[in-house]
Image (spheres, helix red, strand yellow):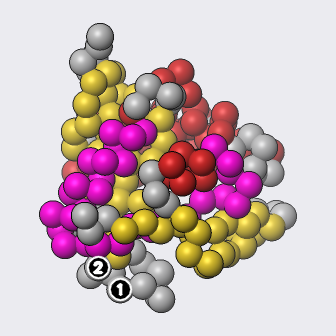
Amino acid sequence: MADVGVRPARRADAAAVAGVQVRAWRQGYRDLLPADVLAEVTAPAALEVWRDRWADAATAPPSPRHRLLVAVASDLVVGFAAHGPAEDPDLAPERTAELITLLVDPPHTRAGHGSRLLAATADLLREDGFDTLITWVFEDDEVTRTFLGSAGWAPDGTSRTLDMGEPVRQIRLHTDISG
């Protein structure tokens, strides 16, 4: 069995994290986002932008409560998760955190990496004093909704519509991480 685990991201992981993001988006969002939008956010130029942003997230997060974690298998980055205090105006950021993203490289899905990232995220957030975790998902993203639902997440009744040349609806999920 390969060595697997979750650790804080390092600057050297930024290219791998951006690559996972682009591959996961191309596969997972191909039926959820307009084709031109998906092509733009996964193009080679976008990959460079994502790499720089993930390098910043690993080395200079906006606060000590923002973190970028990577899932590794035999020293290969196979997934990542980013979290921080919730920014939605109807939430208390001192008690509610947001799972900003959690993605696993398509060839490495269904191997426990997403669950390990989710557990590590919840553990760190509990240590930071958070008791609720939220995330935004595309309403039609059954894969993510099923995964999170199996871990105790549920819709909280809040939704938003993104303008991506056509309306794309998201719903907010939440879970109790108090423990």
Q: Which residue is found at the position 66% from the left and 66% from the top?
A: 170
Vertical relation: 88 (above or below) 6: below
Left or right, residue 21 beside residue 115: right
SS for dot 1: loop
SS for dot 2: loop
The reply to whether the magenta stretch includes residue 57 is: no
Q: Mark 1 is on which residue type?
A: Ala
Residues at discs 1 and 2 in contact (Cβ within 8 Å): yes
x, y (%) of residue 62?
28, 67
Q: Nearer the viewer, residue 137 or 67?
A: 137
Q: Mark 2 is on which residue type?
A: Arg
Could you tell me how many numbered marks the image carries? 2
Assign the C terminus to one quadrant of the image: bottom left
x, y (%) of residue 125?
24, 63
Label 1 crowd (10 A; few <14 / some 14-19 / many >=20): some
Residue under pointer 2: 95
Residue located farthest toward the bottom when viewing the structure as drawn = 90
Q: Nearer the viewer, residue 60 or 63?
A: 63
Vertical relation: 144 (above or below) 135: above
Is residue 52 in view from this perspective? no
Instruction: Give the magenta range.
Output: 114-143
The reply to whether the magenta stretch includes residue 128 is: yes
Left or right, residue 39 beside residue 143: right
